[in-house]
Image (cartoon, helix red, strand yellow):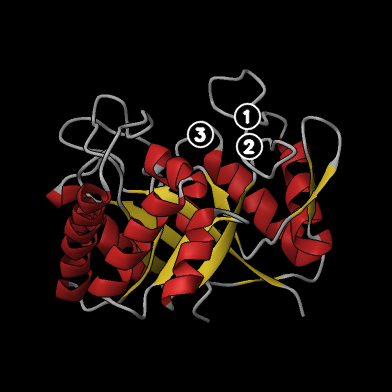
Amino acid sequence: MMRVDLNCDFGESFGIYRLGEEKEILQYVTSVNIACGFHAGDPLVMRKTVQMALEQNVAIGAHPGFPDLLGFGRRNIAVTPDEAYAYVVYQVGALSAFVKAEGGTLTHVKPHGALYNMAAKDAVLAEAIARAVYDVDATLILYGLAGSELINAGKKIGLQTASEVFADRTYQQDGSLTPRSDPRALIVDEQEAVQQVLMMVKEKRVRSLQGNDVPIEAETVCIHGDGKKAVLFARRLYEALQKEGITVCSITR
């Protein structure tokens, strides 16, 4: 029986600024990645978001990023392995405390933005992130881009990993995501995005922008929760997967 996790990045408001935060999306996803204050989020938002996720029985993960509020964590920053390690330990530890205080359990870690994309190709950075997650809690699941150095590093150190694919992003022929600087990076047609997900989950392949099929492992699918029609798209994808007989559930279920 095929199964897949649907995850979304959440809790990315901070202070007076509101980004996404549509509680309704929690009906259609099975795990959330909550910002930890570096690229977005703040203590009050973190607590509120954890509470919402627990109310909906959604698996909770930490979403650590670069300390870059202005760039929303999407700008590449040159860091040493020691710095990356410290950033991840700090952020995962902070969110874990909120989850524990609310009576829940942190289940996974998914790096955000540039930290995620850099670690997909940089083995040294990936190893620093994996080590940080392992040292905080070796039972945590490490989410990373399917086929990436981050997945390799997690497996090497002994973490359970979850190979992630993206519903609304296009792919390059090496299996990497098309950079956001490219106008073709995002899939704006919902039906096209749904069909891409079904292909990745059922057939374990994705069509690259260059026109060739790339093998891919799809254990969890990312839905961006800050889009204008994020809730409607999440429902559409959830229903499409169920119609195909694919069980939608968290990695831990």
- Asked where in the image residue 221 lies, by quadrant, the reply is bottom right
Asked whether residue 27 is in view, the answer is no
Q: Residue 18 vs residue 179: left or right?
A: left
Secondary structure under the numbered disc 1 in the rendered image = loop
Task: Find the distance from the CA under tag 3 to the CA under tag 1.
Answer: 11 Å
Q: Earlier in the sequence, mark 3 or mark 1?
A: 1
Mark 3 residue type: Gly
Residue under the image location 81 percent in, 63 percent down: 202
Instruction: Residue type at mark 1: give it.
Output: Leu
Q: Nearer the viewer, residue 191 or 61?
A: 61
Decide: is 16 above or below 21: above
Foreground pick, 107 / 58: 107
Query: Dots 2 and 1: beta carbons under 8 Å?
Result: yes
Dot 3 surroundings within 10 Å: few (below 14), some, or many (20 or more)?
few
Q: Position of residue 18 (x, y in %)?
A: 28, 33
> Is residue 185 in view from this perspective?
yes
The residue at which mark 3 appears reads as: 227
- What residue is disc 1 on? 186
Q: Is residue 231 above or below residue 94?
A: above
Disc marking residue 169: 2
Element assignment for label 2: loop
x and y, in percent, of residue 26 in the image? 46, 58
**How far apart are the alpha carbons under marks 2 and 1?**
5 Å
Q: Give, as a three-letter code, the residue at label 2.
A: Arg
Instruction: State which quarter of the image contains the N terminus.
Output: bottom right
Q: Nearer the viewer, mark 3 or mark 2?
A: 2
Q: Is residue 217 above or below residue 187?
A: below
